[in-house]
Image (cartoon, grey):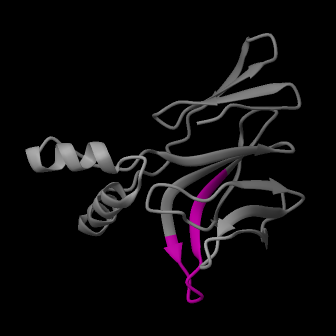
Amino acid sequence: YRYYCSNGTVVVPLDDGTMNAYDTKGKRRYAIKENLPKVELDDKILKQLDTLFTNDLRWKKLYMILKPQNKVMFPETLPVLQAYFVGGNTIYAITYRKKTGSDNQDTFLTYMFNLENGSLITKKYLPFTSRNVLEIYPFAIYNGKIFQIVENDDEEWELTVKHLTVQL
């Protein structure tokens, strides 16, 4: 994960989904310990992971060495957080819990917290484009819009803009 600093607050996520907030002098201001949902690895996700690790150059070589030796083991669940972002006065915690709409647009359960005190503002499914089973494409959230850089069918990068349907 990256660390974000906004309005004098540095937000640091942990593997268990906890997000610690510090002031710029390193003093912890608060911790967000919301019980974020975990997504269990079913056969469909395991097949997607196998395809990803078999074809993605970042993992392919090592995966193809370890897989025939039965040395590849997956956890029971995906990580708690897929990504997070701090924009304005809001922390967006994007989970792996997803829905696919009739327009084939994936939406991911996103928790929104107040940057000042860590309180939960709301949770809602927000539209992000997935790069693969583990990653969404790079994004930023600003002025009620999600800006995302996505690789199109011609393998060219393009900026997509989606309007948020939630008012903070």
Quarter of the picture holding the N terminus = top right
Q: Is residue 15 above or below residue 78?
A: above
Position of 51 with respect to 133 (left or right) is left
Q: Is residue 82 above or below residue 161?
A: above
Position of 23 with respect to 139 (left or right) is right
Q: Position of residue 54 (x, y in %)?
A: 30, 58
| Magenta residue span | 99-111
Position of 35 with respect to 2 (left or right) is left
Dominant SS in magenta: strand
The verdict on residue 11 being magenta is: no
Residue 75 appears anywhere in the view: no
Residue with the most extreme left position = 69
Q: Position of residue 91 (x, y in %)?
A: 73, 43
Residue 146 appears anywhere in the view: yes
Quarter of the picture holding the C terminus = bottom right
Instruction: Give the number of callouts.
Output: 0
Q: Position of residue 30 (x, y in %)?
A: 69, 24
Position of 107 with respect to 3 (left or right) is left
Residue at (51% x, 38% y) in the render: 17
Tell me the quarter of the picture where residue 147 sits: bottom right
Q: Nearer the viewer, residue 41 or 66?
A: 66
Q: Nearer the viewer, residue 159 or 163?
A: 159
Residue at (49% x, 43% y) in the render: 35
Q: Is residue 1 above or below residue 36?
A: above
Q: Position of residue 48 (x, y in %)?
A: 33, 65
Tell me the quarter of the picture where residue 144 sits: bottom right
Residue at (36% x, 47% y) in the render: 59
Q: Is residue 1 above or below residue 50?
A: above
The verdict on residue 103 being magenta is: yes
Residue with the most extreme bottom position = 102
